[in-house]
Image (cartoon, rainbow, N blue to C red):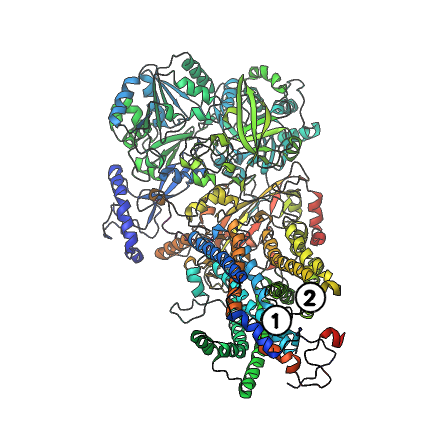
């Protein structure tokens, strides 16, 4: 199939671009030949798909029009959630990943989007290697592997849930092999608990869209837990107060550290993990259980009564979740959900989540067998046990006892480098795969580019080694055959590839609850005291379990709570830090003894308001030593957490927290190293200083007065020296619903990728020179200091608010008048445009920007590697040193949308143009549209009493507006004061 | 100029100098071999100036990132240095033009070097807005409104930075011309004294055929008067326009109407501080005590205490208005100046600019060169910090607390400031070797024999005897 472009502009390609197309299109051509699949599922910009006549451009590549982007549906493999993605492929290379609308969700988190970096990052393996790192031939590797694989061979993987994938695993087992799967951050306790209480060892599918009261015991379901994008979207549908909706769900969180979910809670209670069992028992007792009197905990009885009553009132529309790794606690959670009648509405065990299929018991057995020398062959694939097992060092030792060790993976990581062979694996964006994240929901993954190097699909390797004839086929054909036999049920393969998924979700009657399983839960209420310091290990929001430590975009995606980049930290509450006599940036050793094993993690200290007293929280994913040059700093001793690691000028970023992970709450101790390092923060002040920036109110107040919390105390004086702008055609605008924003940073990563925003590194971020065009401002309420200057917070359990902040495209733009050369000017469509070529870099515009959203190119932030340059979006120029840049509201996407409408002879439809940030937002917090189109969402939201412009009082007249944040909790006195209009009279100091 | 001189006035030149003595004293310093001290100063400052050039080269090679600026604080040392040097430049024009129009005869012995100082300060000042640009190589061209083929893309007449371009270039031109016109009679004297043909040619060309006739003098005085008239408004306009860089913005701490008078007052203050520093050095090292007398120094001390009080008043007014306006942002900006992370710079500024000049209320101290010298250094430091405080403390914490940040200047920035002093002094050392450092033509005019003759007055008498 060939597509003729109707767009004359495209035939006028500049010669440089033509050359580039020629260079890269060969790969695409080969790929197209192999797959025989062309432009399916393509959302074609500027093309009419039904025109079949060929018209060569210069050297026409079948199915591809140079300069036109095609979208292909695929599946994200950034974490085990397996969200659907759309790959935007331009001139034979993927340049952007976006969420694919499906019953499983629609957004794509920052981690998922950043997978492009991993694809193009040239420091992955270009060919199979042996332990010494020398190149080997595939034939040699295959011969060695084939002789080793057979009866007793163990395949150690992460979760493999695809229909075809599992079938191949079955074939491996049929040859006498044994498959062990584990998840570095495990949810096995949930499955095990359900095995006992419901007779099905599964993790149910959670339906937050059905829940009106959600109680989370440390399950960070908006951040990292199971399927955060899906959960976030579902949860946000119950929080939406736009277009006439009046009801809102409640979120109650009881947790030790301040998680993203806790930050979005309506009410939050600080409990240590060791108190969780006791609180769960108290709650279960109030909901019809009789588990005796539990041990001590810090939640008062009245609060528990209130929670229980709220849950009871919501009945089957309530949902209790927990991130506990203790089966007994999970059984209590199951009991509560069962008593509330939630099974079948807010959680479903019959269409379970298959996102974490790891089995910790089998892993433990494997370790025993390895210890006993009973494992002769071990294939490690997709996991990094030397790094991510609590006792990784032990695993490394045990590897020595295995005769044949083979790794399948993209790089010689901590584990693979200990194996005899490494079968270089394709990047997920280069290969076919399938997934079944929820039982019945089948999702396909397809390549977006021909293999960049001599790598191979992991399944193909496996098939070859077990002597399966399918090993000689392209994996796509194996996949197709398997799907035709099982999944498709007569549906066309092509249609499945086009949509990216096949939905066969079908729930049945929920299994009965077995009361007998609750016999042993009483003890869960009496956990041994962890003493002065309890260690909490959690999955980081950017590097997750460590596999993304190779990714620069993610290193520079700030931690949403502390906004620190390029390291993990030991988070402590201000009071705990004071008690320990620590300051921000002090490097400490957090140590613990877990099951007789001594573990320690060396990280800098960070202050976290809202964290439970006497706890220290450390995230996973950092402290990797074999993840390529990116995990190493520039080799300055004062920046190294551990100068002893400073060998050959390199050191690990942060410390590995996995060793501190225990099945039970961990009692830790803390010792100072006497060193202190600089923390690279994107923002260091977390109080609004009582300024009306992130406006908020309570639901109760809002129901009485929809403009509650949105009083403009100082009305703007609308005077301007210059003539007013007229917008005869479009007037683009954006509205951000602060009720929907959860602070996940997906928009920030999306923006950076779409707009070629450079990654600048730790030193530059420390200087406060990160280049992000959009940032999430995190404000702590009732807090009169900042993390940075060390003042204690007025409230030790503050409320948190997130506010995405990008160029506000002011009508009276302060930046526009001050530029001496008119490098920034207003467009007739209401945007503030920046002409990079004209900019001479006086930085006056940035100084005069009240929102501080302009970013200056202090240096040449170029990619030094040509492969890495393939990641650049060809629609956007790469800015040179010395010029200012900022959010353009994705001007390139606006042009594309207008051109598509013009070619179709229609008006631009509301919602057809989506800037990258809005597109990626899992909760649809960012709404873009034409304010001149009275039917558009943004125009209708202008009438919403919640609508406001930040700093309206200085009369910048932004075209970006915000909707007040409404919290579903009792009204605070300060909010009542504001409602009476007395809020800021004394604010003038 | 038929002025009436009071016999009670102290003579402006001491030491019983004859007219020839004056010519000889001034010209000998540019005729003989330079002293070792001069060589030391020339090479010392030259080395520092070379470092300045090297630092700028490095900046152009690497990018503005070699400085410690960031997304919140886009201007730091660069624009602070710019405003500082422009301010220094004010005293020269003030002394030569404004004091000339007000018939302040005491100006004559100091105006030449003050004017030279103005020129060199403006040269230093002008460099900073250039090198602070991200893309100097095109920026220097694009800020000029020259005819081009870029259609409607021209300079932005709404931008205070463009006003700066005009203000600074006008100021530099007028100051240079004014300085040069004042030099012509003295250059002619140097030409006449020259023995070597090269010197004759050099000074001959520069003195443009001056022959000292009444006609020459008549034209000269008229021209000088006209240029003084032209330069006078510039004293007020240049720093007014520089203050617009801040006053027309929306940033709390910048957005204030007090800035034009406040900046002009501050500029005169800092300019006199620097003149005092230079003259005290020159007076000592070049033995000009008889020309730059304690009376001169005292007069300058009085100007300093006046302008120092003016800036002190401005500091107070800013705080009052910040409170009185009721604007929470404005209020915070000033509380933050005095108590925030940059409070140290604010208190250095207040101590140097408001507190230290208070010693000059005492006549004894006002006439003590050592006290004046120390004080003038304080004023220089204080006025540099004034600009730093205005620029950095206003920027680093403006509207959205999420963007608040600190500013960590790098060593390169600090050395660039030092380097600009190197250039300044290097130019000054060249000046005192090449040009008559004192306008002896004018000095003679204010000596007794230059005045309308008065039989009651003894020529060249010791002031202590005749007026004590």
Count of labels in the image: 2
Residue holding disc 2? B301
> Can residue A751 be seen by looking at this rendering?
yes
Query: Marks 1 and 2, how far apart in space?
Result: 14 Å
Residue placed most toward the observer, B265 or B223: B223
Whether residue A796 sits left or right of residue A437 in the image: it is right
Q: Where is residue A468 in the image (x, y as percent from the top left)?
A: 26, 22
Whether residue A46 sits left or right of residue A234 in the image: it is left
Examine the residues drawn in magenta and state their main secondary structure. loop
Residue A277 in which image quadrant: top right
Answer above or below: position of A598 versus A57. above
- Dot 1, how many residues are within 10 Å of its Cα: few (below 14), some (14-19), or many (20+)? many
> Can residue A846 be seen by looking at this rendering?
no
Q: Quadrant of the C terminus of chain B?
A: bottom right
Determine if marks 1 and 2 fall on one subunit: yes
Residue placed most toward the observer, A446 or B413: B413
Answer above or below: position of A847 versus A530. below
Whether residue A650 sits left or right of residue A213 in the image: it is left
Look at the image and give the residue range highlighted in magenta. Answer: A870-887
Residue holding disc 1? B110
Parent chain of label 1: B
Q: Earlier in the sequence, mark 1 or mark 2?
A: 1
Residue placed most toward the observer, A542 or A631: A631
Q: Where is residue B167 in the image (x, y as percent from the top left)?
A: 53, 69
Q: Residue B314: give its label.
A: none
Q: In which quarter of the image is the N terminus of chain B?
A: bottom right
Q: Where is residue A111 in the image (x, y as percent from the top left)?
A: 45, 38
Q: Position of residue A513 (x, y in %)?
A: 54, 20
Parent chain of label 2: B
User: Viewer-nearest of labels 1 and 2?
Assistant: 1
């Amino acid at each position: 199939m060939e597509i003729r472009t109707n767009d004359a502009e495209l035939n006028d390609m500049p010669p440089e671009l033509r050359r580039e197309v020629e260079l890269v299109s060969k790969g695409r051509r080969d790929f197209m030949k192999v797959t025989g699949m062309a432009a399916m599922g393509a959302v074609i910009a500027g093309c009419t798909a039904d025109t079949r006549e060929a018209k060569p451009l210069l050297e026409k590549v079948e199915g591809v029009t140079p300069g036109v982007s095609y979208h292909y549906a695929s599946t994200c493999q950034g974490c085990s959630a397996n969200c659907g993605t759309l790959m935007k492929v331009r001139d034979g290379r993927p340049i952007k990943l976006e969420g694919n609308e499906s019953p499983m969700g629609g957004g794509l988190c920052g981690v998922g989007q950043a997978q492009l970096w991993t694809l193009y990052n040239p420091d992955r393996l270009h060919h199979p290697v042996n332990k010494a790192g020398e190149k080997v031939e595939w034939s040699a590797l295959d011969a060695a592997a084939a002789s080793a694989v057979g009866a007793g061979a163990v395949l150690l993987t992460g979760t493999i849930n695809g229909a075809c994938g599992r079938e191949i695993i079955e074939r491996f087992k049929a040859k006498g092999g044994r498959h062990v799967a584990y998840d570095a951050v495990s949810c096995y306790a949930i499955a095990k608990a359900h095995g006992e209480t419901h007779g099905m060892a599964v993790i149910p599918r959670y339906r937050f869209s059905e829940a009106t009261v959600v109680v989370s015991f440390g399950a960070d379901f908006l951040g990292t837990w199971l399927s955060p994008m899906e959960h976030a979207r579902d949860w946000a549908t119950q929080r939406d107060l736009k277009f006439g909706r009046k009801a809102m769900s409640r979120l109650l969180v009881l947790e030790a550290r301040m998680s993203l979910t806790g930050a979005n809670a309506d009410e939050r209670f600080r409990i240590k993990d060791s108190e969780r069992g006791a609180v769960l028992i108290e709650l279960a007792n109030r909901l019809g259980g009789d588990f005796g009197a539990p041990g001590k905990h810090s939640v008062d009885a009245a609060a528990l009564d209130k929670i229980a009553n709220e849950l009871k009132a919501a009945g089957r529309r309530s949902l209790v979740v927990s991130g506990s790794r203790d089966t007994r606690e999970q059984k209590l959670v199951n009991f509560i959900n069962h008593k509330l009648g939630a099974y079948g509405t807010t959680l479903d065990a019959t269409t379970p989540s298959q996102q974490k299929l790891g089995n910790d018991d089998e892993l433990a057995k494997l370790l025993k067998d390895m210890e006993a020398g009973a494992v002769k062959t071990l294939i490690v694939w997709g996991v990094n046990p030397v790094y991510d097992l609590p006792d990784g060092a032990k695993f490394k030792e045990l590897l020595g006892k295995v005769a044949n060790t083979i790794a399948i993976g993209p790089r010689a990581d901590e584990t693979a480098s200990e194996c005899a062979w490494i079968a270089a694996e394709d990047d997920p964006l280069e290969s076919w795969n399938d997934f079944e994240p929820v039982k019945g929901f089948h999702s396909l993954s397809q390549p977006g580019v021909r293999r960049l190097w001599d790598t191979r699909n992991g399944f193909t390797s496996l098939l070859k080694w077990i002597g399966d004839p399918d090993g000689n086929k392209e994996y796509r054909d194996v996949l197709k055959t398997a799907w035709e036999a099982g999944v498709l049920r007569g549906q066309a393969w092509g249609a499945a590839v086009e949509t990216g998924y096949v939905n066969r979700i079908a729930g049945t009657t929920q299994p009965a609850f077995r009361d007998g399983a609750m016999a042993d839960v009483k003890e869960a209420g009496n956990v041994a005291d962890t003493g002065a310091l309890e260690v909490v290990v959690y999955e980081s929001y950017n590097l997750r379990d460590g596999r993304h430590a190779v990714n620069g975009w993610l290193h520079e995606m700030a931690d949403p709570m502390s906004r620190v980049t390029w390291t993990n930290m030991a988070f402590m509450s201000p009071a705990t830090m004071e008690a320990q006599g620590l300051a921000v940036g002090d490097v400490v050793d957090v140590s613990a003894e877990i099951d007789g094993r001594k573990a320690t993690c060396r990280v800098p200290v960070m202050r976290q308001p809202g964290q439970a007293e006497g706890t220290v929280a450390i995230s996973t994913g950092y402290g990797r030593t074999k993840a390529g040059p990116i995990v190493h700093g520039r080799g300055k001793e004062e920046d190294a957490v551990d100068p002893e690691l400073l060998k050959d000028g390199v050191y690990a970023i942060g410390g590995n927290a996995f060793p501190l992970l225990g099945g039970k709450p961990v009692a830790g101790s803390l010792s100072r190293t006497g060193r202190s390092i600089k923390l690279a923060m994107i923002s260091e002040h977390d109080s609004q200083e009582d300024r009306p920036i992130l406006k908020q109110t309570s639901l109760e107040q809002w129901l009485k007065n929809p403009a509650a919390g949105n009083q403009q105390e100082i009305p703007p004086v609308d005077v301007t020296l210059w003539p007013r702008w007229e917008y005869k055609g479009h007037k683009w605008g954006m509205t951000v619903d602060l009720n929907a924003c959860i602070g996940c940073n997906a928009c920030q990563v999306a923006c950076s990728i779409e707009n070629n925003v450079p990654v600048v590194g730790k030193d530059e971020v420390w200087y406060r020179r990160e280049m992000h065009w959009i940032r999430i401002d995190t404000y702590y309420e009732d807090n009169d200091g900042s993390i940075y200057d060390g003042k204690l917070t007025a409230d030790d359990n503050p409320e948190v608010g997130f506010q995405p902040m990008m160029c506000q495209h002011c009508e009276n733009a302060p930046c526009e008048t001050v530029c001496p050369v008119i490098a920034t000017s207003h467009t007739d469509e209401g945007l503030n445009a920046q002409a990079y070529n004209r900019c001479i870099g006086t930085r006056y515009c940035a100084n005069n920007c009240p929102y501080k959203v302009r970013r200056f190119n202090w240096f040449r932030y170029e990619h030094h590697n040509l492969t890495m340059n393939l990641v650049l979006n060809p629609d956007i120029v790469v800015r040179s040193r010395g010029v200012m840049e900022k959010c353009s509201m994705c001007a390139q996407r606006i042009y594309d949308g207008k051109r598509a409408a013009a070619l179709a002879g229609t008006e631009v439809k509301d919602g057809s143009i989506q800037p990258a940030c809005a597109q990626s937002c899992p909760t649809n917090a960012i709404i873009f549209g034409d304010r001149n189109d009275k039917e558009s969402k943004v125009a209708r939201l202008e009438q919403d009493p919640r609508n406001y412009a930040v700093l309206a009082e200085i009369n910048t007249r932004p075209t970006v507006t915000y909707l007040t944040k409404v919290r579903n909790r009792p009204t605070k006195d300060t909010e009542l004061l504001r409602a009476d209009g007395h809020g800021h009279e004394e604010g003038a100091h | 100029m038929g002025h009436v001189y009071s016999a009670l006035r102290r003579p402006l030149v001491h030491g019983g100098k004859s007219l020839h003595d004056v010519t000889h004293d001034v010209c000998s310093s540019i005729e003989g071999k330079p002293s070792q001290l001069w060589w030391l100063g020339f090479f010392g400052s030259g080395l520092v100036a070379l470092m300045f050039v090297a630092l700028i080269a490095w900046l152009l090679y690497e990018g503005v990132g070699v400085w410690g600026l960031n997304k919140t604080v886009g201007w730091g040392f660069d624009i602070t240095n710019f405003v500082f040097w422009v301010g220094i430049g004010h005293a020269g024009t003030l002394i030569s033009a404004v004091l000339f129009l007000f018939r302040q005869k005491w100006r004559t012995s100091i105006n030449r070097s003050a004017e030279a100082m103005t020129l060199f300060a403006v040269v230093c000042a002008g460099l900073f807005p250039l090198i602070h640009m991200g893309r100097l190589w095109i920026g220097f061209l694009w800020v000029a409104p020259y005819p081009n083929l870029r259609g409607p893309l021209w300079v932005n007449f709404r931008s205070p930075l463009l006003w700066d371009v005009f203000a600074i270039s006008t100021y530099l031109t007028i100051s240079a011309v004014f300085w040069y016109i004042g030099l012509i009679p003295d250059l002619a004297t140097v030409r006449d004294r020259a023995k070597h043909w090269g010197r004759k040619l050099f000074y001959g060309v520069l003195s443009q055929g001056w022959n000292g006739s009444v006609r020459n003098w008549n034209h000269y005085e008229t021209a000088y008067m006209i240029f003084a008239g032209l330069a006078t408004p510039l004293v007020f306009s240049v720093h007014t326009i520089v203050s617009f860089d801040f006053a027309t913005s929306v940033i709390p701490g910048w957005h204030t109407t007090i800035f034009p008078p406040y900046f002009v007052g501050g500029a005169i203050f800092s300019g006199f501080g620097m003149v005092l520093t230079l003259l005290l050095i020159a007076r000592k090292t070049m033995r000009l005590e008889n020309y730059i007398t304690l009376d001169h120094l005292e007069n300058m001390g009085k100007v300093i205490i006046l302008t120092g009080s003016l800036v002190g008043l401005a500091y107070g007014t800013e705080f009052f208005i910040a409170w009185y306006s009721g604007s929470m942002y404005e209020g915070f900006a000033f509380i933050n100046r005095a108590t925030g992370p940059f409070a140290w710079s604010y208190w250095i500024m207040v101590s140097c600019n408001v507190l230290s000049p208070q010693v000059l209320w005492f006549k004894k101290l006002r006439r003590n060169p050592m006290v004046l010298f120390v004080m003038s250094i304080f004023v220089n430091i204080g006025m540099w910090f004034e600009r730093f405080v205005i620029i950095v403390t206003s920027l680093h914490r403006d509207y959205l607390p999420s963007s608040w940040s600190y500013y960590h200047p790098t060593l390169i920035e600090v050395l660039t400031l030092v380097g600009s002093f190197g250039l300044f002094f290097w130019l000054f050392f060249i000046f005192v070797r090449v040009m008559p450092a004192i306008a002896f033509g004018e000095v003679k005019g204010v000596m007794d024999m230059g005045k309308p003759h008065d039989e009651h007055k003894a020529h060249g008498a010791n002031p202590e005897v005749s007026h004590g």
